[in-house]
Amino acid sequence: MKVWVTGAGGLLGQALMAFGPPAPDWEVRGWTHEELELTDYRALREAFKRERPDLVIHAAALSRPRDCEGDPDRAWAVNVGVTALLADLMGEGRLIFISSEQVFDGRSGPYAENAPVCPINVYGQTKAEAERHVLARPQNVVVRLALTYGHSRGGQRAFNEEWEQRWRRGETLRLFTDEYRCPIPAPVAAQALWVLAAEPGAQGIYHLAGAERLSRWEIGQLLAQRVPGALSLIQPATLQEWVGPPRPPDLSLTCERLQALLPFALPAFSTWLAAHPPAG
């Protein structure tokens, strides 16, 4: 089995490559941005023709909503154009596409897998459109991933890394008490994705999230305890104070379809943090 992992330099991609495939005879090729610019469609076609993967886990994306709002053309090229081309190249092969909770407007959480998409920002719009291309072939899989916690090699991929950097500079963060997510650690997400990849009957939409609905403020309290002095650098705020692109207030997800396939329980974020204290 020849497997591609796109976005291998990102937070989830690094975790996928570190965790490894579910079988020793799986040959996994991770692509970073430096190795292959996916929006160079000619180069992507040539690489695909040369290697002919049986399975692609497509984790590459322009994934920060603010970056997508600032450059919507690039967001559509990366998130939709590349995904559509990969779906076409795969043909009868299998594509596992990493989508996002941001395909929802956040007004009716928690969301089940069959909830209609209703994005309110550019990032969510591109992911919803990419899903449409992927699901046009019944063997493909869409995985809507929740807010992901972790530590990347460059220290700049995860939301918590940005928060930690700001705290270490002495900056105060105002965190919303009325914006909810179900954060999941990147290593857990990677393990779940490899289980899903090894399940030949898995197809359609799955949600991948932690088992605990937390506000941004509650997440901040948990993480600030792990950085000396950070508890004094967080303040509660509400979405009424926000000035900028629309923010979905409740992107909590239910994960029954995926949980039924997993040999382990998707963890509550606070429980997982307690079991994994900071290094050093």
Image: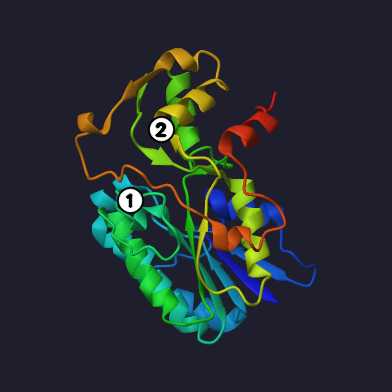
Up/down of 257 relative to 245, above or below: below
Which residue is rendered at x = 55% and y = 74% of the image? 203
The x, y position of residue 99, in whole percent, is 44, 60
Asked whether the beta carbons under mark 2 and mark 1 sit within 8 Å of each other, the answer is: no
Residue under the point 23% across and 45% down: 246
In the displayed structure, 219 sits above or below 19; it is above
Residue 206 place in picture, x, y as percent? 51, 63
Toward which corner of the image does residue 47 lie, by quadrant? bottom right
The residue that disc 1 covers is 108
The mark total stands at: 2
Evaluate whether residue 171 shows in this view.
no
Q: Is residue 259 left or right of residue 99?
A: right
Which quadrant, please, contains the N terminus? bottom right
Does residue 50 appear anywhere in the picture? yes
Could you tell me the amino acid type at mark 1? Answer: Ser
Residue neighbourhood size for the residue with mark 2, other residues' Cα within 10 Å, grouped as few (<14), some (14–19), many (≥20): many
Q: Which residue is mark 2?
A: 216
Disc 2 to disc 1, C-alpha distance: 18 Å
Residue 19 % position (x, y): 70, 54
